[in-house]
Image (cartoon, rainbow, N blue to C red):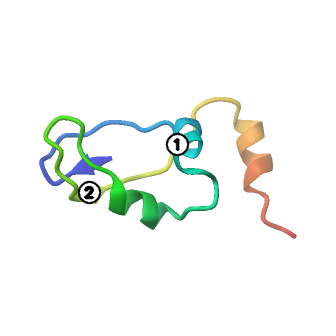
Amino acid sequence: MVHGCEHAGPVRVAWLIDQVGDQVTVADVIAKMKCTRCKQRNIKQYSITFAGASMEAMRGADQRR
């Protein structure tokens, strides 16, 4: 995640779900996030990446329902 202040850092998805639940959108979360260094809320760039057991990620990504 890159803030308008140019500070950047990762956010663990599992931790984030524990904090805000699993029914919010990425846009909702981004709108409320702020830099832990300078408290700025202007998120300029973000990406969602998965670290860990990639087969589990692929199973969770299956949207055929």
Q: Where is residue 43, by image quadrant?
A: bottom left
Q: Amino acid at mark 2?
A: Ile
Of the residues tagged 1 and 2, which is closer to the observer?
Answer: 1
Q: Secondary structure at mark 1?
A: helix
Which residue is at 50% across, 36% downward? Answer: 12
Few, some or many C-alpha atoms within 10 Å of disc 2 (few <14, some 14-19, many ≥20)? many
Q: Amino acid at mark 1?
A: Gln
In the image: residue 41, left or right of residue 19: left
Marks 1 and 2, Cα distance to the nearest angstrom? Answer: 19 Å
Few, some or many C-alpha atoms within 10 Å of disc 1 (few <14, some 14-19, many ≥20)? few
In the image: residue 60, left or right of residue 50: right
Identify which residue, 64 or 41, lies in the foreground: 41
Q: Where is residue 17, by image quadrant?
A: top right
Percent across and percent down for residue 53 are: 70, 31
Residue reaching furthest to the top? 52
The quadrant in which the C terminus is found is bottom right
Q: Which residue is mark 2?
A: 43
Percent across and percent down for residue 50 are: 58, 40
Which residue is at 15% across, 54% downward? Answer: 4
Q: What label does residue 19 carry, if any?
A: 1
- 45 shown above or below 14: below
Percent across and percent down for residue 37 are: 17, 35
